[in-house]
Image: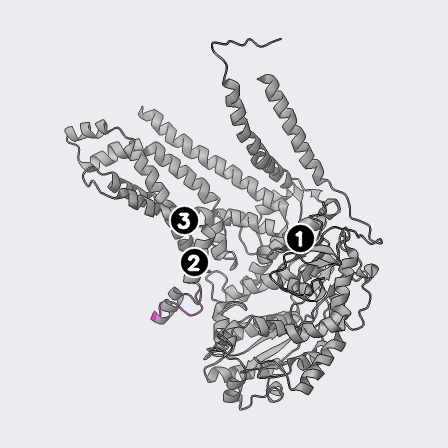
Amino acid sequence: MNKLLKKFLAVSFVFVLTFVLIGCGETNGSDDELNDGGSIFHIYAWNTEFQGFFNKYVSDEKANDSSIETYHLDGVPVKWTIVTSDNGAYQNALDMALRENATANEENKVDMFLAEADYILKYVNTSLTKDIEKIGVDDFSQAYQYTVDIGTDRTGVIKAASFQCCPAGMVYRRSIALEVLGVSEPEDVQPLVDSWEKFEDVAEMMQEKGYYMTGSYADTYRVFSNNADKPWVDENKQVQIPTPVQTWMEQAEKFVKEGYTKTEGVWDGGKTIEFAEGGKVFCTFGPAWYYNFCMGPAMGEGDEHVGGTYGDWGLITGPQAYFWGGTWLLCPSAGSNDTLVAKTMNAFLNNEEILERLVKEDSQFSNNKKVNAKVAADYDAEGKGNGLLNGQNDTKVWVEMADNIVVRYSTIYDQHCNEGLQTAFVKFLKNDAEINTKEKALADFYADLLKAFPNLVVPD
Amino acid sequence: MKENKNKKNPSYAKWGYIFVASFFVVYFLFTFIPQVLTIYDSFFDYTDIVGTLETEVSFAGLKNYKMLFSRNIRGDIEILRCLGNTIIIWLIGVIPQMSFGLLIALIFTSSKLRLKGTGFFKTVFYMPNLIMAAAFASLILALFGTIGPFHTLFVEKGWIAQTFDFISDKTWARILIAFMNFLMWFGNTTILLMAGIQGIDNSVFESAKIDGASSVHVLWDITLPLLKPIAVYVFITSMIGGLQMFDVAEVLTGKAKNNSTRTIVMLINDYLKVGNYGHAGAVSVVLFIITAILSLIIFRSINRKGESMS
């Protein structure tokens, strides 16, 4: 028995050692050469939105059809790994894959991945992603500047290309505007809410007539946070709350106290239910993808839009223009299909034929100024527009707004700070027994932030 | 040297070792090694690489442990607070769980009542244990959320304000979690205690009856003491499970970041989510030590009583 035991221990010891040594992987692939020839084009994403567009416009099959089992690009089969972004699962999976990419086998090697503005900085500022100008993506003449800025690292190297531009504004109920303000057309409503002071005045008028101004205390958060005047954390690791966010805190506190809004989150059912027929909410904020795809109760049932508020909405800039969302494409340094990545990026940046269809058929706002302007003009000429917005030519509104979007001061702490501040502050808004003052809410936020980043310095 | 093979008594012992070996291999690879690596990780500082894709970490010694036990900006020591939350929620759940389980077990095994159809009830009581905890918590979240039926009803009756939130409230959230744990586990407790009662030799009860003992006497001096081994088993396993309470609490209160229902494993999860493996490892080690100590204490105290009795 002793011999058997010894052999067993020896084998398992070797086993363990192998596992441990595998962990000590190599560094990344070359940054200057093109890595090509992979047998599978492997793409990571957190949902299937981009996959649909890829299949329809870029793949060899040029169609998004459920009967097609595998799509190809230039003959190379395409594989998607979709991991939900709930609880940070997508980033965890992606980070692990990227760290091991140099030694991964063909099946698992990541060739391209998607990222959102909230956390893209982490992927832009690492050597694990590639300079896309070096793989042949260098024409950003028609792209909106902020999308390029977001994808640029601190040394000026462009690492990411966006296929969307997401300018965002205020959508309001025309019938409620008519009842309370006496006007309902966008050009008449905009002057009444073109500053935050006026916005508050209108909120009071809404409340007097039994309406809520917004459905969520957090509806206006991003309008403020995406117009920040300073980064969340400065070079000395000092945490500082951007001034617009402080304004938001004051506004949210007042709005909840006065009953101008509901204590619901942006995505909560308690807010969206007010978009249905008979709903009491006057306005909300968002880009095209929000009102086209996330306002379910407003759409009602079926083609007749029964029970909804279809056609009763209008789009204006509101108190402040901003952007929300967007999807960027990046290329790992140790990928295996750089040419295909470049082909995909260039298609969504500059292929006017594809992009025109993307805007017209899929209700997107592309990242190409020329195409967007053309579609806006086409819609004007044809009298076409968005059904939810009573036929308004929303593309034209975005074309006017999108050029003015400026994004500065991104940090890797943004996602944590934005989410954390709101989560802590809502406890105060809801009269939590323990977090019952603004200071305690901030302390709660800092405590949570320091769990992830203990080296930051918070204000006293 | 050749082994002596006795053909009349072939040694099957080695087969025993081989069969058991598979367990040890699995344990070694999937439990022991990760435990060792967790302890190893807890001595390194991962905080410089949180939020980045770097992988180089520096040795931190006991820094992580020190940070865990220092007061945070909110004024509490998070790990102790989470431990408190865990134990409180567990107690709120386990006391009814064991009392109710015992009550039903006694009723079902009562020779006086001779209930029919206990098998059916046993199945029904056990069923909540089969529900996925996450699904169950989602259901409760829908029921008690701000547009759920309970909230709407209570607001209408004027019992709560519109801004009240069951999920963020300290007392209600804890009760809801404990209630879910209770529902999921009392069936299991009932069945085990029933088995324990039925395992008591009937002759003991008969002789007690002959001696004229009242049913209370029988319960207190015979049934309960003889039930102690099973009860201890149920209590210890419930405690170990309770200390590791995670899915129910996380699904119900994780998003709202309720500080009064954050359990220890939720705290570990918070650190894991952001990649702070150093702190996560430290909390895991602390939890391991606490679990071991508590189990030992309970085990010893029960056994010591047993020894003094005999």
* Viewer-nearest residue: A451 or A407: A407
Looking at the rendered image, the quarter that the C terminus of chain A falls into is: bottom right
Instruction: Please tell me whether the stretch drawn in magenta is mainly helix, strand or loop.
Output: loop
* Viewer-nearest residue: A113 or B178: A113
Look at 45% across and 82% down and name the residue there: A210
Look at 50% across and 18% down and name the residue there: B13
* Viewer-nearest residue: A379 or A61: A61
Residue at mark 1: A94
Q: Label 1: chain?
A: A
**Depicted A82 relative to depicted A307: above or below:** above
At label 3, the amino acid type is: Asn
Picture coordinates of residue A184 (x, y %)?
Answer: 56, 88
CA gap between label 3 and label 1 equals: 34 Å
Q: Are marks 1 and 2 in contact (CB under 8 Å)?
A: no
* Viewer-nearest residue: A388 or A55: A55
Q: What span is colored magenta in the figure?
A: B157-173
Where residue B139 is drawn, which disc sits there?
A: 2
Mark in the foreground, 2 or 3: 2
Task: Name the secondary structure under disc 2.
Answer: helix
Looking at the rendered image, the quarter that the N terminus of chain A falls into is: top right
Q: Give the class, few, some or many, for how many residues have Cα within 10 Å of label 3's Cα (few <14, many ≥20).
A: many
Does residue B95 appear in this view?
A: no
Both marks 2 and 3 on one chain: yes
Residue at mark 3: B181
Q: Label 2: chain?
A: B
Q: Label 3: chain?
A: B
Q: Give the class, few, some or many, for how many residues have Cα within 10 Å of label 1's Cα (few <14, many ≥20).
A: many
At label 2, the amino acid type is: Leu
Picture coordinates of residue A213 (x, y %)?
Answer: 52, 79
Both marks 3 and 1 on one chain: no
Picture coordinates of residue B274 (x, y %)?
Answer: 62, 52
